[in-house]
Amino acid sequence: MDGSEAARHWTPDEFRRHGHEVVEWVAQYLETLEARPVVGDVEPGWVRAQLPPSPPEQPEDFGAVLADLDRVVTPALSHWQHPGWFAFFPTGASGPSVLADLVSSGLGVQGMLWSTSPAVTELETHVLDWMADLLGLPERFRSSGAGGGVIEDSASSATLCALLAARWRAAGDGPFDRLRVYTSGQAHSSIEKAVRVAGLHPDQLRTIDVDADHAARPDHLAELMAADRAAGLVPCFVVANLGTTSSTALDPVGALAEVAAEHGAWLHVDGAHAGAHLVLPELRWIADGLERADSFCMNPHKRLLTNFDCDCFWVADRRPLVAALSVLPEYLRNAASESGAVIDYRDWQIPLGRRFRALKLWFVIRAYGAEGLRRHVRHQTALAQDFAGRIAAHPRLELSAPHPLDLVCFHHVDGDGASEALLTRLNATDRVFLTHTRLDGRFVLRVSVGTQATEGRHVDELWALIDRLA
Ligand code: PLP
């Protein structure tokens, strides 16, 4: 073999040259973002129609690939980083985070076991302890005790892992048919999905009633659990929503934890979006009672300037999680794992393999500093509060729910038809993009402020459009 059979790989110099081109392309994309419509407007099938039916047989010029990003990809994107993006929840994004992902890909390592790259595991443990400091989390979630943190791809995965740990704690390997799970009707769909993936029947999920502010009622949870216990069933898992998706309603974590504890159930707190607000000491009241929770998750990939995907997940006791998820084949055995002195994060998640995601948090925390992160969350929250004040004062609009954080829900006083028409007109301007929900049966517009690039002038522009079109 003389090597002529091998594929031709880029030389380090080619990588360097094309790498510079790619960074330049991304920088230009970000620079020109504000001038673009927020959401691309293409018919279904348009993207595929631009692409050749078969893959190229011969290597293509890299310039042609980059040119196709502009021709085929960007026209068909919803620009989540656009300053006029007020839809869903924000996507985390920042320069340091993008570059950390590049380094992670460049290193090409896989951190399934401590021994497969000690830096992947130890940096992750360390950065999750830093995050616990930044968010003022209870001591029990830190790695120095029985608990600790891990990075999952998403809050959905974190909730599923929490449920699997709770299921293990309540019933080991089964049977599981007597177990019951509880959350409010305002919970994110990922809770119901976790129930299904965990092999429980949808009837095993109980819905906790909410109060006028859409927060779960602990008294109703107590009733549901007592009735289940009386029927010989086993309360297993409660999810408290720290910021619901529809309206950032805040379940009373401490009161729910107390009820869960009375019945021996696991309390998981889903702070996917709102959890980032805990960087602000003045907002920590939203998670009062968190020291009684068994697990907590939040997504830096929403409010905390970290690119998708990055969910931080903490448990107060890692033993049931590891017991539920650990399967040890011979080919993974190694001295470090057997010494018991290391963490193997493969046992804290569903897949075996794992990316070097801790780099993103490490870069972001160091580039912004705790002060920079607080400034970002405080600024966006203040913009939302200012916006809510304008809605409250408008003769044709009404606030639909409390707005403790960075999301404002409102509707038109003339009813659903007028609210829907307003949403359609706003989005048709191409300058802003909003989404909706239903609260108490009413069609409601959501303004989720905002992206990294959103400033006061963008909220002013949104307000001017709303005032004109309402
Ligand atoms: N929980 C809540 C409250 C959410 O708002 C969301 C997404 O918006 C999720 C869970 C799911 O997040 P992920 O996409 O990280 O699974």
Image (cartoon, rainbow, N blue to C red):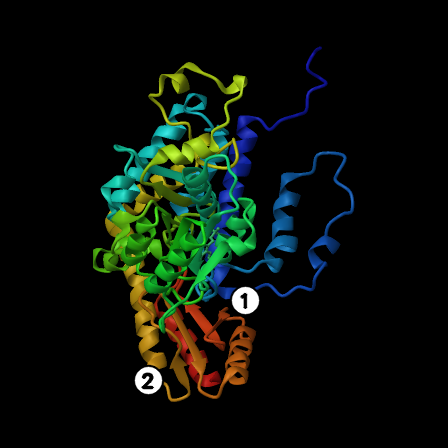
Q: Position of residue 313 (x, y in %)?
A: 38, 43
Q: Where 172 falls versus 96 (above or below)?
A: above
Residue 321 lies, in percent from the top left, at 41, 36
Label 1: which secondary element: loop
Secondary structure under tag 2 reads loop
Query: For the view shown, which residue lies furthest in the left direction?
Result: 282
Question: Number of marks in the image?
Answer: 2
Q: Are marks 1 and 2 in contact (CB under 8 Å)?
A: no
Q: Which mark is residue 126?
A: none
Residue 266 vs residue 340, the one in the foreground = 266
Determine the CA span between mark 1 and mark 2.
Answer: 29 Å
Name the one closer to the observer, 28 or 81.
Answer: 81
Residue topped by disc 2? 393
- Look at the picture and state if 250 lies above or below 135: below
Residue drawn at x 41%, y 80% as measured from the top left: 464
The residue depicted at 34 percent of the width and 74 percent of the height is 387
**Residue type pointed to by label 1:** Pro
Q: Which residue is mark 1?
A: 37
Quadrant of the rendered structure where residue 451 is? bottom left
The percent position of residue 214, horizontal first and vertical second, equals 39, 69
Between 31 and 357, the residue placed more toward the observer is 357
Left or right: 320 with respect to 332? left
Q: Is residue 264 above or below residue 58?
A: below
| Three-letter amino acid code of the residue under disc 2 | Ala
Could one spot residue 246 in this view of the protein?
Answer: yes
Crowd tier of the residue under label 2, counting other residues whose Cα lies within 10 Å: few below 14, some 14–19, many 20 or above: few
